[in-house]
Image (cartoon, grey):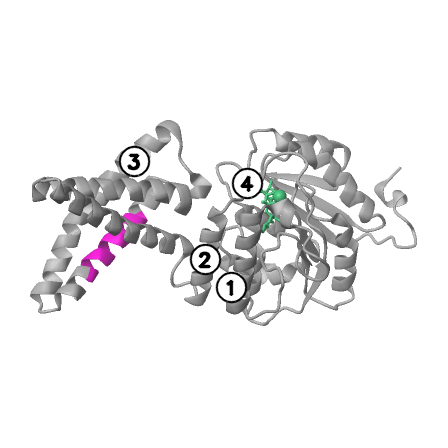
């Protein structure tokens, strides 16, 4: 029997209507269930589902491909050498040819029963974007599923997001939505691939505000596997907000890197003072303080700024030496640039800042290429 003969003739339509994009990392146990749930709610519709898997060690991609051999509506976009939720979602959407695309988690926490309602609203041209919202209408059922700290962080992020976006979205952090595909294509080159907040980014990048609809749902508890998002995502998100506020003049990663650098200055001064108090000579104390600052900068950058490419084990040690080597070079440049500016008669503070800016830019550009 052909695919077409299986669909209900009353609603049959040969054109692809919607692509469901599902980013996955270690979701092997959830894939088959999700496909059958999505298939059940979209009966009579022309749909496809694209899993975007970052080569999960648990073999999620193999599981998707096994299902795909029996059902051509299921596809696997198997990515190598990259990690990251936003990037995965963007690539999945760009791989779609359907007029509408949905984005949904692969862990069954999102309620698939919203999909037909979302599609209907978009096809009826009632909206350009339909968001599954955990915070609109009804009581807050998701507090327990998310955990108290994440819940508070998520609410704070939402509040801030609304201030910056000036779009009335109760859940701009939602990972569950359906959108007219061309609205994403329009802004795709501008989207950040390294964050988690893809919906926020898509909305913030639009030149003409999107007509938006929100549908409430209850965020379910995860049954299998673990969450990959933690409190670090809130910090990352603040970076994305700044990028939007400065119209992308400052990338979230550079901002994070600069903030870590500033914290390094603090580490440097505290260490210097402590060592001087212990009776160490200035040169020794200054040298040790610089090493301390570089070490803490390296570890924080590895854990936060480059959390999507985090190094562990031997890679962590090798990266550390490269990082220290590269950051030592602008120390000299810092002094040189500062001196030139100073000799031209600028105030000492301006000269100091000029040197520091050059050093920060150098450190950022070189270490992002050579270390992470
Ligand atoms: N391809 C890929 N690459 N997928 C990823 C990655 C990655 O690096 N990291 C996470 N995922 C997938 C997961 O496998 C899952 O399908 C989905 O993205 C969401 O990840 P979870 O780890 O389950 O996130 P959560 O449940 O803690 O977070 C929820 O709340 C966030 C808002 O606070 C989700 O609904 C998010 O979408 C939402 O933004
Ligand atoms: Mn989840």
Residue 283 horizontal/vertical position (percent): 9, 42
User: Would you say the residues marked 3 and 1 are in contact, meaning their CB atoms lie under 8 Å apart?
Assistant: no
Q: Distance between the residues labelled 4 and 3?
A: 25 Å
361 part of magenta stretch: yes
Give the residues drawn in magenta, as a range: 353-365
Residue 36 horizontal/vertical position (percent): 78, 39
Residue 54 horizontal/vertical position (percent): 55, 38
Q: Distance between the residues labelled 1 and 4?
A: 23 Å
Q: Distance between the residues labelled 3 and 2?
A: 26 Å
Q: How far apart are marks 2 and 4 (CA)?
A: 18 Å
Q: Which of marks 1 and 4 is in front?
A: 1
Residue in the foreground of this view, choosing between 202 and 190: 202
- The residue located at (55%, 54%) in the rendering is 152
The disc, 3 or 2, on the residue closer to the chain's N-terminal end is: 2
User: Would you say the residues marked 1 and 4 are in contact, meaning their CB atoms lie under 8 Å apart?
Assistant: no
User: Would you say the residues marked 2 and 1 are in contact, meaning their CB atoms lie under 8 Å apart?
Assistant: yes
Task: Work out whether residue 57 can be spotted.
Answer: yes
Residue in the foreground of this view, choosing between 245 and 156: 156
Mark 4 C-beta closer than 8 Å to ligand 1: yes
Residue in the foreground of this view, choosing between 170 and 316: 170
Mark 3 lies on a secondary structure that is helix
Mark 4 lies on a secondary structure that is loop
Mark 1 lies on a secondary structure that is helix
Q: Nearer the viewer, mark 3 or mark 1?
A: 1
How would you classify the magenta stretch by its main secondary structure? helix
Q: Name the residue under label 4.
A: 228
Residue 160 disc label: 1
Q: Name the residue under label 2.
A: 238
């Amino acid at each position: 029997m052909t695919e077409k003969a299986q669909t209900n003739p009353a609603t049959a339509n040969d054109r692809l209507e919607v692509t469901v994009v599902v980013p996955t990392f270690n979701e092997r146990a959830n894939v088959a269930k999700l496909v059958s749930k999505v298939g059940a709610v979209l009966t009579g519709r022309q749909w496809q589902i694209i899993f975007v898997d970052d080569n999960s060690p648990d073999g999620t991609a193999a599981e998707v491909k096994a299902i795909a051999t029996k059902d051509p509506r299921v596809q696997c976009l198997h990515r190598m050498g990259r990690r990251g939720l936003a990037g995965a979602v963007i690539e999945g959407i760009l791989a779609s040819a359907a007029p509408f695309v949905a984005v949904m988690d692969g862990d069954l926490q999102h309620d698939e029963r919203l999909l037909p309602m979302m599609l209907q609203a978009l096809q009826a041209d009632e909206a350009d974007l339909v968001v599954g919202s955990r915070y609109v209408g009804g009581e807050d059922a998701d507090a327990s599923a998310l955990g108290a700290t994440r819940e508070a962080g998520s609410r704070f992020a939402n509040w801030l997001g609304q201030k910056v976006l000036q779009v009335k979205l109760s859940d701009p952090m939602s990972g569950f939505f359906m959108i007219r595909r061309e609205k994403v294509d329009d802004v795709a080159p501008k989207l950040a691939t390294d964050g988690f907040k893809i919906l926020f980014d898509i909305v913030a990048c639009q030149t003409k505000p999107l007509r938006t609809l929100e549908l409430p749902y209850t965020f379910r508890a995860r049954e299998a596997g673990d969450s990959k998002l933690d409190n670090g995502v809130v910090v990352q998100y603040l970076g994305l907000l700044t990028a939007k506020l400065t119209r992308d003049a400052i990338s979230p990663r550079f901002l994070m890197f600069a903030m870590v650098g500033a914290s390094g200055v603090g580490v440097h001064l505290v260490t210097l003072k402590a060592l001087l108090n212990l009776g160490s000579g200035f040169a020794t104390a200054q040298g040790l303080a610089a090493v301390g600052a570089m070490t803490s900068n390296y570890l924080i950058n590895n854990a936060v700024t480059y959390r999507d490419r985090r190094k562990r084990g031997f890679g962590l040690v090798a990266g550390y030496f490269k990082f220290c080597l590269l950051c030592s070079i602008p120390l000299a440049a810092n002094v040189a640039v500062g001196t030139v500016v100073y000799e031209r008669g600028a105030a000492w503070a301006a000269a100091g800042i000029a040197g520091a800016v050059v050093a920060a830019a150098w450190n950022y550009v070189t270490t992002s290429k050579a270390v992470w």
